[in-house]
Amino acid sequence: MQEPLAVSPVNSLLSSSALDEVQTQLVQTACRHFRLRLCSVFMVEPRSGDLYGRMPAGPAGDLEPVFLRLGEGIAGSAAMLRDVVYAPDVSRDARYVATRAGTRSELAVPLMVNDEVIAVLDCQADQADFFDAAAIEQVRLFSQPAALALQNAQRYSREQRRRAQVEAVNAAARETTSVFELEQLLDRLCK
C-alpha cells in the first residue's frame, strides 16, 4: 500500500459533471493509489436497492454490465449493511459472487450521503488478505468525498435531462402558438 491518501485528489471529482466521467475518474484514482487489479462503482437503484455497475471484460477491457441484488455478493452486502464488508479470502466467503477470474480478496465500501447508500466502491485484489486495517481505513476515507462527487454528478445529469425536456416542451409550445390552422399545427408537431 502507498502512504496515506490525501483527500485532495478526490476533491477534483467534486467539480466533475458527467456521472460516467466521475465514475471513471474515481475507479482510476482508487486503482492507481491502492494498487488494485480491479475496482468498480456499483450504483444503487433507489427504488429497488439493486446495484448495477460495469466491469472490464475481454482482452480489450470492454465494460460489461454487472447487476447484483441488495445483499448479494460482497458489494450487495455492504449496501445492505451500510458498512464496509471485507473478504480477505473470497474462496472462503459464502457471500462472494465471482465477477472476474483471479480475485482473491475483495473490499466493498458503501458510498453514503446523508446516511443514504448511493453506490458501493468495490475493490478486488489478486492476493489473499490484501487489505490491512490501515488500507481499509484509507479506502473508507477515500469514499467520503467520492460519494459527494457521485451525488453531484447524479444531480447534474438529472438537471440536464430536465432541461432537455423543458426545451422540448417549449419548442412544441412555440409551434402551437405560431400556427393557427389545426391541420398545419398537427403536421408540424408530428415532424
Image (cartoon, rainbow, N blue to C red):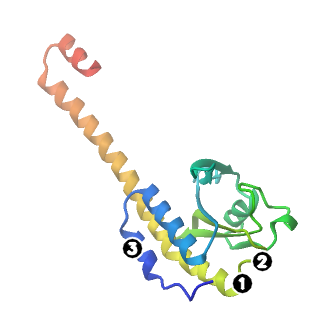
Q: Is residue 40 left or right of residue 8?
A: right
The quarter of the picture where residue 136 lies is bottom right
Q: Residue drawn at (53%, 84%), measured in percent from left and top?
A: 5
- Residue 132 is marked as 1
> How dense is the environment of label 3, judged by Cα within 10 Å: few (below 14), some, or many (20 and up)?
some
Mark 1 and mark 2: Cα distance apart in space: 7 Å
> How dense is the environment of label 1, judged by Cα within 10 Å: few (below 14), some, or many (20 and up)?
few
> How dense is the environment of label 2, judged by Cα within 10 Å: few (below 14), some, or many (20 and up)?
some
Position of the N terminus by quadrant:
bottom right
Q: Secondary structure at mark 3?
A: helix
191, above or below 99, in the image: above
- Circle nearer the N terminus (2, 3): 3
Q: Kindly identify the amino acid type of the residue bearing the numbered disc 2.
A: Asp
116, above or below 35, in the image: above
- Residue 12 is marked as 3
The quarter of the picture where residue 19 lies is bottom left
Q: Kindly identify the amino acid type of the residue bearing the numbered disc 1.
A: Asp
- Circle nearer the N terminus (3, 1): 3
Q: Secondary structure at mark 1?
A: loop
Q: Kindly identify the amino acid type of the residue bearing the numbered disc 3.
A: Ser
User: CB of mark 1 within 8 Å of CB of mark 2?
Assistant: yes
114, above or below 141, in the image: above
| Circle 2 or circle 3, nearest the eye | 2
8, above or below 59, in the image: below
Mark 3 and mark 1: Cα distance apart in space: 27 Å
Q: Which residue is mark 2?
A: 129
Q: Residue drawn at (77%, 77%), measured in percent from left and top?
A: 129
